[in-house]
């Protein structure tokens, strides 16, 4: 499996966003009306049809013009809606630019709350439409269902099911990178929430479903099953290492995740993954 390193706005990676303008946005066609755009940051889904254009996530602000140009090449005009799968900056950094170009941003209530805390009341970064449990966007002869999964990657994750196209965008609940996910405990994320979300999605899709992960290449159900099993195995290994109320220091010294024999991204080293799993499972 091709390994791509996911990117988030963290203190260790702020410098990457400064060079995002050097990235090239690449477009992959999934179906007649659906595309995925790869750049620097979270993968973007684009629906292009009779009603116009809308996208899921918008990466960094410095990539907005490249993204807009890529969309214009698919259909003249600008995006009318932007759906945020969660609040992280590599998925919402372009909100302001797209909003000023006429797009209406849609996201979970907790995304609105966290972006308000970051950007302030009335900012163009904020969703203009927010929801609690689910919402359906009827556009381009598609019924895109947004479903909230509590305490998964964050507390505001939404998975987008394009029912007519048999495509699903999972945001950062699914890292198709060959490794473990970033469990953002400080933003309400949890290991169990990720597993619950993946299990629910697996029940909702079939072997022909195209899966757009938050990071990594386009995927299928079989790869999501492998990912799910990896996360579940990591959980079991951690719980065993944590028995008898073992301290975080003790667990880190024991290095339990070494048993998985997988690669860890530079921005998300094994020690950090171990710490986040420990904090979530504790």
Image: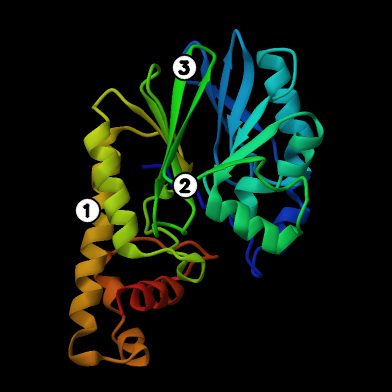
- With 27 as the anchor, is 232 left or right in this view? left
Residue neighbourhood size for the residue with mark 3, other residues' Cα within 10 Å, grouped as few (<14), some (14–19), many (≥20): some
Name the spot of residue 115 as percent of width and height, x first: 66, 56
Does the image show residue 273?
yes
**Residue 132, labelled with which disc?**
2
Q: Earlier in the sequence, mark 3 or mark 2?
A: 2
Q: Nearer the viewer, mark 3 or mark 1?
A: 3
Q: Earlier in the sequence, mark 3 or mark 1?
A: 3
Query: How far apart are labels 3 and 2 at the CA level?
Result: 21 Å
Residue neighbourhood size for the residue with mark 1, other residues' Cα within 10 Å, grouped as few (<14), some (14–19), many (≥20): few
Q: Residue at x 26, y 43 (%)?
A: 200
**Residue 97, labelled with which disc?**
none
Front in this rendered view, residue 224 or 260: 224
Q: Quadrant of the N terminus?
A: top left
As drawn, the residue found furthest toward the right would be 100
Q: Secondary structure at mark 3?
A: strand
Q: Residue at x 70, y 46 (%)?
A: 60
Query: How far apart are labels 1 and 2 at the CA level?
Result: 29 Å
As drawn, the residue found furthest toward the top would be 50
**Residue 142, labelled with which disc?**
3
Q: Which residue is mark 1?
A: 229
- With 133 as the anchor, is 91 left or right in this view? right
Does the image show residue 170?
no
Query: How far apart are labels 3 and 1 at the CA level?
Result: 32 Å
Q: Secondary structure at mark 2?
A: loop
The answer to which image quadrant residue 153 occupies is bottom left
Q: Nearer the viewer, mark 3 or mark 2?
A: 2
Q: Are marks 3 and 1 in contact (CB under 8 Å)?
A: no
Q: Earlier in the sequence, mark 1 or mark 2?
A: 2
- Please say if 253 is above or below 44: below
């Amino acid at each position: 499996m091709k390994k791509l390193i996911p990117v988030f706005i963290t203190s260790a990676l702020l410098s990457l966003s400064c060079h995002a303008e050097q990235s090239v946005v690449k477009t992959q066609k999934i179906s007649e009306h659906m595309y995925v755009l790869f750049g620097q940051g979270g993968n973007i889904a684009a629906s292009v049809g009779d009603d116009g254009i809308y996208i899921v996530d918008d990466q960094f602000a410095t990539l907005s013009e490249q993204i807009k140009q890529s969309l214009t090449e698919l259909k003249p005009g600008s995006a009318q809606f932007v759906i945020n799968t969660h609040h992280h900056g590599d998925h919402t950094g372009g909100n302001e630019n797209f909003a000023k170009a006429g797009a209406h941003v849609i996201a979970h209530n907790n995304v609105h709350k966290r972006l308000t805390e970051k950007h302030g009341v009335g900012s163009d970064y904020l969703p203009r439409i927010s929801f609690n449990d689910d919402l359906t966007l009827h556009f381009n002869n598609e019924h895109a269902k947004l479903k909230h999964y509590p305490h998964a990657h964050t507390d505001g994750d939404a998975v987008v099911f394009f029912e007519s196209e048999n495509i699903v965008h999972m945001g950062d609940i699914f890292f198709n990178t060959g490794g473990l996910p970033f469990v953002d405990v400080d933003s309400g994320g949890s290991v169990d929430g990720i597993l619950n979300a993946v299990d629910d999605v697996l029940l909702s899709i079939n072997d022909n479903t195209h899966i757009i992960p938050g990071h990594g290449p386009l995927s299928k159900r079989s790869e999501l099953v492998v990912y799910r099993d990896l996360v579940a195995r990591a959980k079991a290994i951690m719980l065993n290492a944590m028995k008898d109320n073992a301290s975080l220091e003790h667990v880190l010294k024991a290095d339990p995740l070494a048993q998985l024999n997988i690669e860890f991204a530079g921005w998300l080293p094994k020690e950090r993954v171990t710490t986040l799993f420990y904090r979530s499972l504790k």
